[in-house]
Structure formats: structure tokens, C-alpha cells
Amino acid sequence: MTLTIQQSMIIIGIVAITTFITRVLPFVLFPGHKKTPDYIIYLGKVLPFAMIGMLIVYCLKEVSIFKPSYGLPEAIAIIVVILLHHWKKNNLISIGIGTVFYMVLVQIINV
């Protein structure tokens, strides 16, 4: 075996082991016959919204309203996602169509 194949096998093995551990660990730490701690339940309710907030900040951190396009594709796409989500109440539809809409806007507006 070449060095590249060996390195690839090692990387795949590490990824497989890490994935297995992250999937099994919650069941080991919080078995089904015991009550889940209140702070874990709290984190389960709060963290999804925090993650969405972090993703929004990450996606918009380099948008400048002073450079050409002036943040228009981002602003229009955000409005479309919000309107779609209020209308359909479906995350997959609002995010999927919003993403496609944003990609089209970037191609049109940045020309």
C-alpha cells in the first residue's frame, strides 16, 4: 500500500470511530431508565435557536452595505425565507427555496 492509501485508511478509521462515539455517548451518559437532567432538557430547548442565530451572524459577517450589491441579495433572500416560513411553516421548503433564490440573486445582482 502506498502512503496515501494508508493515510486515507487512518483518516477513515478515525472518522468512523469518532462518529460511533458521538452516536453512542448520549445513550451511555443518559440511559433510558433514568430521568434526563433538567439542564440537558433546557439545553435541548435553547441550543437550536442559538445555533440558528450563530449561523445567521456567520453568514452575514462579511456583507458590506458600502460595496456594490450593497447587501441586497442577502436582505432579499432573508425576507423571502421569513415570508416562506410564515406561509408554509416548513423549514426544508423555506431554507431550500431561500438558498436557491439567494444563489440566483447573487448571479443577477453581482453582474
Image (cartoon, rainbow, N blue to C red):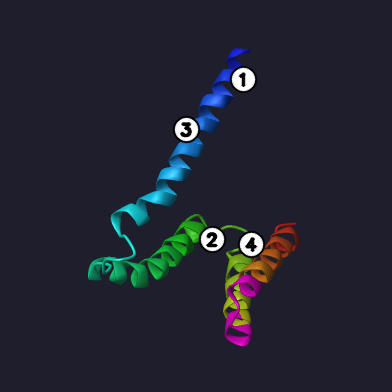
Which of marks 4 and 3 precedes in the sequence? 3
* Residue 89: % across, % down: 58, 83
Label 3, secondary structure: give it: helix
Q: Residue placed at 53% from the left, 63% from the top?
A: 65
Neighbor class of circle 4 (other Cα within 10 Å; few <14, some 14-19, many 20+) is some
3D distance between C-alphas at marks 4 and 1: 45 Å
* Magenta stretch: dominant secondary structure: helix
Pick whichever of labels 3 and 1 is earlier in the sequence.
Answer: 1
Label placed on residue 69: 4
Magenta stretch holds residue 65: no
Amino acid marked by disc 3 = Ile
The first of marks 1 and 2 along the sequence is 1
Q: Nearer the viewer, mark 1 or mark 2?
A: 1
Amino acid type, mark 4: Ser
Q: What is the C-alpha distance between the residues marked 4 and 2?
A: 8 Å
Percent coordinates x, y for residue 63 in the rendering: 53, 59
> Pointer 4 and pointer 1: residues touching (CB < 8 Å)?
no
Callout in the foreground (4, 2):
4
Q: Which residue is mark 3?
A: 14
Nearest to the observer: residue 17 or residue 103:
17
Query: Sequence order check: which comes first, mark 4 or mark 1?
Result: 1
Quadrant in the picture for residue 106 = bottom right
